[in-house]
Image: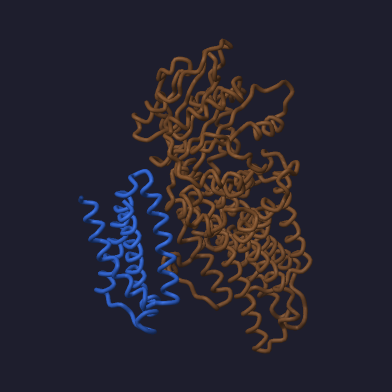
Amino acid sequence: MSMLIVSGAALAFSGFAATSLTMDRHYADIHGRGKEPDARLRLRLRILGWLGLLLSFMACIGASGWHIGPVLWCGILSLAAWTVTLLLQYHPRKLLHSAWIGIPAALLATALLLR
Amino acid sequence: MKEGLRQSMAWVHTWSGLLVCWLLLLVFMGGTASYYKHEITFWMKPELHQAADAPSRVTPAESATLAVRELQQRAPKANAWFLDLPHERNPLIYASWTNPPKKGMSREERRAAFRHQNFTLDPMTGLTTAAPRDTRGGEFLYRLHFDLYYMSAIWGRWIVGIAAMCMLVAIVSGVITHKRIFKDFFTFRPRKGQRSWLDAHNATAVLALPFHLMITYTGLVTLMFMYMPSPTKVLYGAEQNTMFSEVFPNAERVKPARQAAPLADIAPMLQQAERAWGEAPTRIVVSNPNDAHARVEMHRPSGQQLSNIEPTMIFDGASGALLSQAPPPSTTLAARAAIYGLHVAHFADTLLRALFFVCGLAGTAMVATGALLWGVKERQKYAKIVASGGRVGFGVRLVDALNIGAIAGLPIAFAVYFWANRLLPVELAGRSELEANAFFIAWGAAALLAQIRPTRGMWRFQLTLGALLLAGIPILNAITTDTHLGVTLFGGAGLRPVAAFDLVVLLLGALLGWAAWWLGRKANRRAAAGKSADIAQPSTLEAA
């Protein structure tokens, strides 16, 4: 139960991190001034970002049901977005590294949901 | 004059926000605290802590039987009994009752009498606990956030309602006027003056937008029969009570038969409900006890659904037979219950409750940064005048002073409320009113001082004071009770609320302390840069 919520939170974080990297300003925060993601990378990141958010929604529904799950998801989204915002400003490289947490979280969430 | 939609919305956003922001700060802080009103009340009644330390080993049926036995002795002729059994957020058995109203009793007198018609049982021993001190606890903060104080509840609700409607307007117009809501989604740029305040305002507002919209809208819905009376007036005319009994059939009370009949054993009824739900009811209401028309309502614990109306099973009190499961509510009522339920969040478990609390804090920060932003922007118009030794306009000074009084002053008032709870003598008459007065005396003093000297020094003074008072609460608790952090952190689960309260106020105090330190560092930097204008400037948060 709670493992689903944890993976849901990690997925929301990674999803938002990927989304933030599609934006020129934040991509430059990490890769240096003036750098821009190319179109293919941008598309890939955007898809990953939405996938992360979608899977995080499913994880919340799986953990708390259709009544309370969406409410939980909204709260988790806010928390994830604040974390991404602060990391981008103060530790942009760490954001890049910690965003990989989304991969194992996705596997865990899928496994728990299909169980 | 032709203006774009965005500019006109910016105007609406500014004024609908600014006019009510100081009241909204009170509402947001009080409402956010209310998510933990039971925990706050429990912290404010240290007499109960001892009983909560040991883990409860009695079954729900046994606790209900214990409470009913005590109620039979104390209030056999009551109108209704209310029982709260131990569960996750409540370690003890609470029981209270209402008596048939005496003639000529005003509503306030009945409410005051009700406050003394209760007792608490220790589920371990089955004995009544030490009488807790007279305090309204978290209930005061909860009521404060929509009834206000020192005025009739109706007036308070209208004032808060108007503020909430302004807030709703501010949220919608704010979204429209926000030029780069997606581009700036993750943006926060510190140390850039006005830019940073705007970023902070956006980050606290946009990233928790679902919460802000929800809480404002649902807050209005909780009092919709008051704010929008026309539809029910048209449909029911003078028969408003008929409307309520038709819309809320559960709330209807059965009239007593005035014929004595002993109350059936409560345990089998509770066990029947427990079997049906897979979990024991946590709240039991017995109306007309010891009467032929006695009714026993078992309420299912919340946590399954959004609704604030929990499923109930109703039993005949005299025979103990199941009369009905409450009928499934109509779609309209279910929708209202879900909307209402979202606001009060009874369904929230520990994690979700914490998320609601954090979002509430974000809402407070959103209102505060918005209020500060107005001053920051407006002050720029006076930059030249101030530089040549002049003063800022009346409006800027007033807003600065109100900002200090609300943003830095309100935390002081909250802290003083908790200090008063521990320091006022227990046997004092009218103690709970004195606690509330302490809240407003502290707030009034802070607001007045801010009006007299709305300077950066005042910001630092009030923030530091708030920080010390809040962070001092765990120490105060350690001195005045036996349940300090050293005990509560390692004690039974029943004491967890006390530990959590101490830790959260400590954290909030640290946050205020950090704000005061940050302001001071800014002041020092300015001084080091040798800008002498600082002294001439009456107030500043941003100008550094």
Residue B237 in view, yes or no: no
Q: How is the image coloured?
A: by chain
Residue at (74, 73) in percent of width and height: B392
Q: Quadrant of the C terminus of chain B?
A: bottom right
The mark tally for this picture is: 0
Q: Is residue B158 left or right of residue B176?
A: right
Q: Can you give x and y, in whole percent of width and height, for residue B467 in the image?
A: 63, 66
Residue at (70, 48) in percent of width and height: B436
Q: Can you give x and y, in whole percent of width and height, for residue B465 in the image?
A: 68, 66
Q: Can you give x and y, in whole percent of width and height, for residue B22 in the image?
A: 65, 57
Q: Is residue A75 left or right of residue B362?
A: left
Q: What tint does the image give chain B?
A: brown
**Where B174 falls versus B311 (above or below)?**
below
Query: Quarter-wise, where is residue B75 in the image?
Result: top right
Residue B484 in view, yes or no: yes
Q: Between B438 and A68, which is closer to the camera in this rendering?
A: B438
Which chain did the image draw in blue? A
Residue at (56, 12) in percent of width and height: B260
Q: Can you give x and y, in whole percent of width and height, for residue B317 in the image?
A: 48, 18
Q: Is residue A54 left or right of residue B87?
A: left
Q: Quadrant of the N terminus of chain B?
A: bottom right
Query: Quarter-wise, where is residue A104 in the image?
Result: bottom left
**Where B475 falls versus B294 (above or below)?**
below
Q: Between A8 and B164, which is closer to the camera in this rendering?
A: A8
Q: Between B123 and B28, which is closer to the camera in this rendering?
A: B123
**Where B251 falls versus B177 (above or below)?**
above
The extreme top residue here reads: B259
